[in-house]
Amino acid sequence: MYFSLLPDVQYDNKPISYPFSESDYVVAKNFFRRYKIADTIFDSVVYYQKYTIQDQDRPDTIANEVYGNSLYDWVVLLTNNTINPLFDWPMSEYQLREYLDEVYDDPYREIAQYRTDSAADQITQHGSVIIEPDTVVDEKFYNSNTTWTWQDPPPAPTDTRFVIDLTDSNNYANDTRSESDAQIVPTGTGSGTTGGFDIGTHLKFGALASNAQDLTGSFVTNERYAVLAPNNIKNYATFRLKGIRGNNFNGGETPDAGAEDLRIRLWENTNSLTTFDSTQCTLLSDQIIISTTVDTTVEADANNENIVYYELPIPLANRKENVFIEMYQQANSGNQYDHYGLIEFTFYVAPELLTYTKYEVIDDKNVRVNNILYQYVIDEATGQERWGIAQTKGYVFYDEKLGRSREILGQDISRPVTVFEVESEKNEKKREIYLLKDDFVTAFIEEFRRENRYKDSNSFINNRLKQAGI
């Protein structure tokens, strides 16, 4: 029936052999005439109904079931813009497997693509949807993950910086003065004004009990101090103190009274002393490094999460070869109140003296040594921060529950998809078709007949060759 609606054409059939004196004309159907339905019409439920093709279905059996005429099989095909039934019509399960076995070596294990997990799988595994589900990704994404070599960066060359550990008693000088209210202590509770800072071992200003006595039996004064053994700071332009400041919630009282600032005093050791005696040294500088006026909410909070780096320049005139470094607090509210917890000093070389160019301190958690980046990150296995070298990059996303960015293995958020699975999905999609409702079939056929007729214009085909369509 379909071909009867196509227009005829007289095909000029030249003789195959010489002479070419005569032409034979053969009447044939013009298969080049095409009729395509606009895709938008399928959005209307008025004209069409959905139908799922079963393994036993053929276009003619569906036409017979729906329209009562198997010759309307072309209507089923044309209304779905099916050009080649051999490829556009779904195969049965048996036909599909037979086809795949013929075309592919191992369609059941051969990987056709990689795809992100479904929304349901992501919620089950991760608690939420963290990436667009069912998105095709490449093999690099699937295999991407962060593997770490856990390794501390090598120490900075001495001509770049040096670090003084304030938790090591060997780094301090003996002092001719009475014992100060400052000691190396273990971590505190991290709460209240007197619980002590929960930052691990540190130098604590306010370590002794109220009315404590020094080794000579004298009562401790309101001064607090700790003096480091003599150091050569000739080539260093800045130093940085790592520590925490009390805020009435984190185990230390807020330093809010006069003269409670923490100061750094540099003393030139002109007599090469091993025991500090200010009467035999020259005061080079006296600077406030942690002020009582600093906004404490920036420095620390009730959860003890913020250890701050306080930095001061070293004036050129004060860069000497033999210097005592004194941490000093002139006054305090009482021995039981520890305003400061200190961890380490770091000295940085003057830029004009830098000779080692392969060591770059990017920030406190990133150091590049000979083009290898060391990062201080959270080890997902232990939940602790540590130094490591990242080998590859995983998928990075913001974890709302943790309140920070995380990286996960590409394999934890995507999966390989076999050829069989992809082809099966394609085949299943072909099963979903649209059927023109029976009420509109007659009108559709008439329109098809009308549109296939030749027009008066000769722009379609030479008048000598065309013949009116049915």
Image: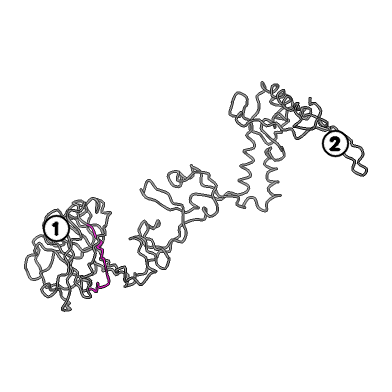
Locate residue 410 relative to residue 301 in the image: left or right.
right
Locate residue 58 relative to residue 128 in the image: left or right.
right
- Indicate the quadrant where residue 91 lies: top right
Amino acid at the residue labelled 2? Asp
Asked whether residue 242 is drawn in magenta, I would say: yes
Query: Residue 378: x and y, percent?
Result: 37, 57
The residue that label 2 is drawn on is 12
- Please tell me whether residue 57 is drawn above or below residue 348 in the rendered image: above
Q: Residue furthest left?
A: 218
Indicate which disc residue 260 carries.
1
Q: Residues within 10 Å of mark 2 (few under 14, many from 20)?
A: few
- Please tell me whether residue 245 is drawn above or below residue 118 in the rendered image: below
Under circle 2, the secondary element is: strand
Question: Which image quadrant: the C terminus?
Answer: top right
Q: Residues within 10 Å of mark 1 (few under 14, many from 20)?
A: many
Query: Residue 142: x and y, percent?
Result: 52, 53
Q: Nearer the viewer, mark 2 or mark 1?
A: 2
Magenta stretch secondary structure, dominant: strand
**N-terminal of the two: label 2 or label 1?**
2
- Report how far apart the C-alphas of labels 2 and 1 lie in the structure: 109 Å
Asked whether residue 12 is drawn in magenta, I would say: no
Q: Which residues are magenta?
A: 231-244
Picture residue at 89% right of the left edge, 43% below the top:
16
Locate residue 116 relative to residue 95 in the image: left or right.
left
- Please tell me whether residue 78 is drawn above or below residue 154 in the rendered image: above
Locate residue 5 relative to residue 187 in the image: left or right.
right
Query: Residue 433: x and y, percent?
Result: 64, 32
- Indicate the quadrant where residue 37 lies: top right
Query: Residue 258: x and y, percent?
Result: 11, 56
Foreground residue among 435 and 36: 36
